[in-house]
Each structure stands twice: as C-alpha cells, then as structure tokens.
Amino acid sequence: MRTLVSLHTRLFDTLETTLAPILMPTLARFVFAATLMIYYWNSGLTKLGEGLSGLFQPNFNAYVQILPRMSEAVGYDASQLGAFWRLVVLAGTWAEFILPALIVLGLFTRLAALGMIGFVLVQSYVDIVGHGVGSDVIGAWFDAGSDSLILDQRAFWVFLLAYMVFRGAGPVSVDAALRARATPQISAA
C-alpha cells in the first residue's frame, strides 16, 4: 500500500509542479474565452448607440438593462438621469468589452478577473433587484437542480475568475512577456 501511495504522491506532485503552472492558468483563460467573452461582448453591443459616437452615447437599452428601476422612474427618458448615471452606464458598457479582452490577452489578468467578479456580482444584483427575476432563475445551492442562471451558473463563473485572480494568466500571456522584459537579465561574464 505504501508503494501505491508513494507512486500516487510522486506522480501528482510532478504534475502539480511541472504541468499545472503552465496548463491551468492558460486553460482558465481559454475556457473564459470559449464560454463568456462573446456573451459579454454581445451584451455590450446591445448597449452601444449608433455609429462611432455610440461608444460615448449609450442607447436606450443600456439604461434599461443597467438601471431598470431608475429608467422606469423617469419614464424611460435617460436624459433625466444626469451625468453621474450616464458615466455609470458607460463604465458598465465598456467593462463588457475591456475586461474580457484583457483576460483573453492575459494583460493585467488578475485585476481584470477581479473586475469581472465585481461585474458578475453587480449583474446578479441588478437581475434580482432591478429586473425582479424569479426564484427559478435565482435558484438555490445544495438542491437537486444545477441549472439556475444566477446561483449555480454564476458560481462557476466567479470560481473561474477567482482562479485567475490567485494564479494569474500563466506563461502564454502578455503579463508573462511583460514580466520577462522587466526581469533583469544576468549575463554569465
């Protein structure tokens, strides 16, 4: 039995020290790109106004999606919400493009993943409080179902993002290239 335990320990210690630091952060970014990047970019596109100026003038959908109760309170006239709320909507819209792009590129990955965790939490709050989604969408942990959109699905999103916060982008990233450039090279003279 000791031989089996020893073999198990050597095998998985080797995997953990050699393969995991390369594979896992890169795989985390790949899974994010394959499952969430386009989701967020498509969501961001629904908020942009017309033409190039639309990057700075979010459309009606942006206000209704991000500030549903406030939009309703002003009769869906976004001009009544003021400059601060316009900046909030712009920041939320831009975040849907910028944060996923940073994660996929592996640039400032830890900060971008942390920002995405905050985004997912705010998104969930707005869905529950602002849009009033029902308990079937919210779901519950430790129940027989694993398909609720908020508690079940977004827990996996946050776990994936938290992994990147703690482990970084991995060796195949802009972060790694920048770190390599910043590290002084010692010559063997």
Image: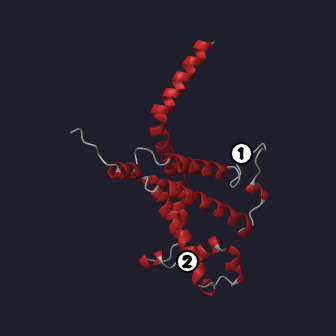
Q: How is the image coloured?
A: secondary structure
Residue occupying image coordinates x 65% and y 60%: 121
Give coordinates of residue 172: x percent, y percent. Answer: 40, 45
- Answer few, some or many: residues within 10 Å of disc 2's Cα (few below 14, many 20 plus, some between 14 and 19): some
Label disc, if present, on residue 146 of the rendered structure: 1
SS type, badge 1? loop
The answer to whether 117 is drawn above or below residue 77 in the figure is: above
Residue type at numbered disc 2: Leu
Image quarter where the N terminus lies is top right
For marks 1 and 2, give the one nearer the viewer: 2
Give coordinates of residue 143: x percent, y percent. Answer: 79, 44
Which residue occupies the foreground of this view, 177 or 32? 177
Horizontal arrangement in the rendering, residue 93 relative to residue 177 (left or right):
right
Q: Is residue 91 visible?
A: yes
Q: Is residue 45 visible?
A: no
Residue occupying image coordinates x 57% and y 84%: 83
Res 186 → quadrant: top left
Residue occupying image coordinates x 77% and y 55%: 136
Q: Which residue is mark 2?
A: 87
Marked residue nearer the N-terminal end (1 or 2) = 2
The answer to whether 163 is drawn above or below residue 125 in the figure is: above
Image quarter where the C terminus lies is top left
SS type, badge 2? helix
Residue occupying image coordinates x 58% and y 75%: 88
**Marks 1,2: beta carbons within 8 A:** no
The answer to whether 18 is drawn above or below residue 102 in the figure is: above
- CA separation in Å, label 1 and label 2: 36 Å
The answer to whether 96 is drawn above or below residue 29 in the figure is: below
Label disc, if present, on residue 126 of the rendered structure: none
Give coordinates of residue 35: x percent, y percent. Answer: 54, 50
Give coordinates of residue 76: x percent, y percent. Answer: 66, 82
Residue type at numbered disc 1: Ser
